[in-house]
Amino acid sequence: MTRDPKRYTITAALPYTNGPVHIGHLAGVYIPADIYARFQRLQGKDVAFVCGSDEHGVPITIKAKKEGITPQQVVDKYHAIIKKSFGDFGITFDNYSRTSAKIHHDTASAFFKKLYDEGKFIEEVTEQLYDAEADQFLADRFIVGTCPKCGNEESYGDQCEACGTSHNATDLIQPKSAITGAVPSLKETRHWFLPLNKYEPFLKEWILENHKKDWKTNVYGQCKSWIDDGLRPRAVTRDLDWGIPVPIEGAEGKVLYVWFDAPIGYISATKEWADREGKDWEPYWKDEETKLLHFIGKDNIVFHCIIFPSMLKADGSYILPNNVPANEFLNLEGNKISTSKNWAVWLHEYLEDFPNQQDVLRYTLTANAPETKDNDFTWADFQARNNNELVAIFGNFINRVTVLTHKYYDGIVPEPSTFTKIDEKTLTKLKAYPSVIESSIERYRFREAQQELMNVARLGNKYLADEEPWKTIKTDEERTKTVMFVALQIAATLAVLSEPFLPFTSAKLKKMFNFDGLEKLPNWSSLQEISPLLMEMPLGRGGLTIAKSELLFSKIEKEQIQAQLDKLEASKKANEAANAKVEPQKETVQFDDFTKLDMRVGTIIEAEKMAKTKKLLILKVDTGIDVRTIVSGIAESFTAEEVIGKQVAVLVNLAPRALRGVESEGMILMTETPDGRLVFMNPDTSGVGNGATIN
């Protein structure tokens, strides 16, 4: 690999089309990849930035069963949602494809067939988990059980989402079918395996020796752990009816395993793009002067650093990734983001709730990106970063510059006069920022790079505050022209530097500063060539007319944030209700046993909290028979004042029992909602008084 690659092939992990894209996906994969791709294009580099929908995973078939539709209907629905939301959010894929496309089926089949013909697979008859009730073998996501490493009782057959460990389904403790809930049995089946153990020497040299210093520690560490534990053959086929059919005789009813199929999607997406653009796809995957990068989340490290490179090595004609800058996970309001539990901020919903505010989310997710550890997104932080940074620092500087330029010079960039040491020092600092930001981006430190971008805006605010053109305009017009000229150069530089991070804001700024009217459009490289003496600046030596100030960012009010918090809470309650476990039926009782229960309508006439307890209320209840004392554990759900006057169902012939020294002479009948709240079992008492029996 040369120090300056001829081209860049940038991939972003293929999202499963069993649901929309959420902020965890954006922070971990798509925003960093887009920043990097935009940055390289700004430098005039040849870039192929590809992605696509992963449509053959077992989660697709599970979703189809749950919704009562076909897998194809599932992927068509979510592919459309995902592709549109990426476009609306400004993710600049050169091609967003899908693994159900014919070009992908053909590419993946040909890849498998080549390795098969060259004897790169081993064929084995093994025992795999089988659900007799469903009459099918269970692929990894059709099995749940206890993780052998951390004890998580809801681990999948291929990976535990609690600890991140990858394993085989047969490693699970107490596995059960996700289809029927039955305990699966082992049954023989024939499959083809990629012998990863044969590629250990290659992987040790390529990763452990060559990439120890330039790969992120979390990526290198996970790879080393896998290699040190010893690699085993990995199946490349599965017994399923949804996926790419295995393209050899004797493999009827089998498809390519999704982990084998999906990464080939990067290649097929590049082919599709090249065909459309009239390019040759092969240099982007087979030329050593191409820099190949995979942007992924940490749960995909093993596939992109161990398995896919072994596949490429087995083929022998492909380049290997230069880097795999995987991020950790993003949590939401203190809890893990979960598609199945609907605990997420969905991209397409954000775009509806916050129209034309794509950059606010991009900025917040980059500022809090989980680059080295899991981080947390909160709506309060989202509001604070918008109001205190984008509005108060970035937007404020641009607004001051444009308003003053129109107030003093009718929007025409003034010709500068003499530059003071402060001016030259400021311009020298400005000139350094492109290199500083570039260094951070090239090391995949996007949080750091964005902080430096904001420092440019801070530089502008400080310069204006120190030089006070609103004062010098009354005493020294020539000095004011120079100050405004320098301030405008800072603003115009922000228009270019902000494009990878805040592309919609950058577009507004370029329009405001009439970049189309410049002879030479500024780019990243031209900013680094700024000379305070020659004044080869983005806005030239003056005379260009800029547009009036346009609102870049608007303040986000607490009501908007509360609405999002309420939406999350409602989603949480709805999910709990949908997944509430119904208690199994108790032991059968005889009719005579039931008739012994004496349940009456009663009214609570007095109530007080029992001292030194959290849950107990002492109630006086008029049962129609008598007024009796009942101690009830409802104090965490109701105050004493709330329950006075309530008509309730009372079990009156329950044997008395002493609770904390108070004799309780019955039981109030209650039930519990899915979110854990107690509610009264109120009888229908219209026209019925205390003491009426409940039959």
Image (cartoon, rainbow, N blue to C red):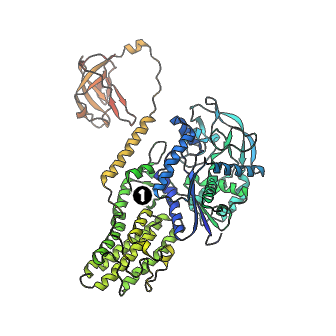
- Callout 1 crowding tier (Cα within 10 Å): few <14, some 14–19, many ≥20: some
Q: Residue furthest bottom?
A: 418
Residue 554 in view of the camera: yes
- Residue 5 percent coordinates (x, y): 62, 70
Amino acid beneath label 1:
Gln
Q: Is residue 345 visible?
A: no
Q: Is residue 523 left or right of residue 294?
A: left
When the figure is inspected, residue 690 is found, relative to residue 251, above or below; the finding is above
Q: Residue at x 36, y 73 (%)?
A: 546
Looking at the rendered structure, the number of numbered marks drawn on it comes to 1
- Indicate whether 541 appears above or below 134: below
* Element assignment for label 1: helix
Residue 330 position (above or below residue 432): above
The image quadrant where one finds the C terminus is top left
State left or right for residue 32 relative to residue 676: right
Quadrant, the N terminus: bottom right
Residue 626 figure quarter: top left
Determine which quarter of the picture holds residue 683.
top left
Residue plotted at (34% across, 20% down): 654
Q: Position of residue 174 (x, y in %)?
A: 59, 36
Q: Is residue 378 above or below residue 608?
A: below
In the drawing, does residue 606 fall left or right of residue 116? left
Q: Position of residue 534 (x, y in %)?
A: 45, 85
In this orientation, which residue lies closer to the viewer: 217 or 40?
A: 40
Q: Nearer the viewer, residue 414 or 300?
A: 414
Relative image position of residue 664 (x, y in whole percent): 30, 25
The residue indicated by pointer 1 is 358
Q: Residue furthest top?
A: 592
